[in-house]
């Protein structure tokens, strides 16, 4: 089976690529920076950008299944090209925010474009990525063994990126998943303070948790740069999913325990979802130094 993985160097895509190769599939990896890509030799790496669909034309020829990273602005054109090229199955890396109704203009348009194509489709909708904590908390933990956050008791079910990849690989390569949307979360409801404690256990060192105001946290994230700066307003509650202004106090006021058990990768893989503790151990060296 020939499978094209877009977003191939991302937190999920790179795991999808490696698993597909291990299973013996013919894998193509799409990336904007070929020189920075580090894949097994068997992977055919293609330079391209979903924001510029014309760069995908040759890459799509002969592809059976497509793992589609969400780019709403060009989704209809990319999906149309895939259909013309003979792709028969598309798996969308979507978001749990579609399931809850918060996402109407980022992941949802991609899902709709794929559904309208008439091709086999499956949506993979992860909730909060555990790996985001590496981007947010990694720099201060490495530098000072501290996390500064305004909402120590805010909680969610962070999901291991490997669980997301496991589900993506399963639905890309096996029948029986067409027309389904799988919402994925971690198996445990954890406060941010508890997440920091689990990271501390994994690296074998104490990590201080300093409570700051949302405004102070925003300045910290902006100074940190990268993912933290790009997403500061949304992550800290200054804006909602659609980009409109919101109240940061609502972040901690929401009680996710009222939601009951949340769906995990186990529904697809048949294996218990990985815990945040496992995720912390998997990334301990990245937090340590």
Image (cartoon, rainbow, N blue to C red):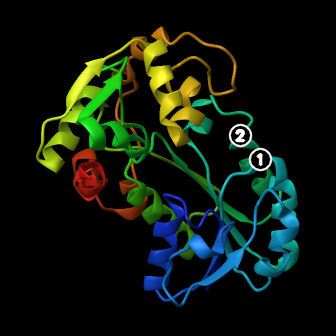
Q: Quadrant of the N terminus?
A: bottom right
Q: Is residue 170 visible?
A: no
In the rendered image, the vertical position of residue 107 relative to residue 70, given as above or below: above
Tell me the crowding category of disc 1: few under 14, some 14 to 19, or many 20 or more residues within 10 angstroms, Cα based: many
The answer to whether marks 2 and 1 mark residues whose Cβ atoms lie closer than 8 Å is: yes
In the rendered image, the vertical position of residue 73 relative to residue 228, given as above or below: below
Which element type, helix, strand or loop, lies under badge 1?
Answer: helix
Q: Quadrant of residue 243?
A: top right
In the rendered image, the vertical position of residue 123 relative to residue 15, given as above or below: above
- Residue 209 shown left or right of residue 73 in the figure: left
Pick the front one: 270 or 281: 281
- From the top left corner, tell me how far across and down residue 47 is, in percent: 72, 74
Which element type, helix, strand or loop, lies under badge 2?
Answer: loop
**Residue at x 51% of width, y 76% of height:** 38
**Residue at x 72% of width, y 81% of height:** 63
**Residue at x 26% of width, y 31% of height:** 146
Q: Is residue 162 visible?
A: yes
Badge 2 or badge 1: first in the primary sequence: 1
Pick the front one: 31 or 92: 31
Task: Name the residue tied to disc 1.
Answer: 72
Give the Cα separation between the discs numbered 2 and 1: 6 Å
- From the top left corner, tell me how far across and down residue 268 is, in percent: 43, 60
Task: Name the residue tied to disc 2.
Answer: 106
């Amino acid at each position: 089976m020939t499978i094209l993985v877009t977003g191939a160097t991302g937190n999920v895509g790179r795991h999808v690529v490696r698993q597909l190769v291990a299973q013996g599939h013919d894998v193509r990896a799409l990336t904007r920076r070929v020189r920075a890509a580090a894949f097994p030799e068997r992977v055919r790496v293609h330079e391209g950008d979903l924001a510029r669909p014309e760069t995908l034309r040759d890459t799509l020829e002969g592809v059976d299944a497509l793992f589609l990273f969400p780019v709403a602005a060009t989704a209809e054109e990319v999906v149309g090209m895939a259909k013309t090229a003979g792709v028969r199955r598309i798996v969308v890396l979507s978001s749990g925010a579609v399931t809850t109704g918060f996402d109407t203009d980022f992941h949802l348009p991609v899902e709709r474009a794929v559904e309208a194509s008439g091709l086999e489709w499956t949506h993979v909708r992860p909730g909060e990525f555990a790996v985001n904590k590496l981007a947010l908390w990694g720099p201060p933990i490495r530098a000072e063994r501290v996390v500064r956050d305004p909402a120590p008791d805010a909680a969610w079910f962070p999901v291991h990126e490997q669980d997301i990849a496991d589900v993506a690989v399963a639905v890309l390569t096996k029948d029986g998943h067409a027309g389904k949307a799988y919402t994925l979360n971690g198996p445990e409801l954890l406060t941010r303070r508890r997440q920091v404690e689990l990271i501390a256990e994994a690296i074998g060192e104490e990590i201080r948790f300093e409570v700051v105001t949302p405004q102070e946290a925003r300045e910290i994230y902006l100074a940190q740069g990268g993912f933290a700066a790009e997403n500061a307003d949304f992550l800290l509650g200054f804006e909602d999913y659609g980009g409109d202004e919101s109240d940061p106090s609502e972040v901690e006021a929401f009680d996710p325990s009222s939601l009951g058990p949340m769906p995990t990768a186990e529904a697809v893989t048949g294996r218990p979802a990985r815990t945040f503790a496992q995720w912390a151990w998997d990334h301990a060296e990245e937090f340590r130094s």
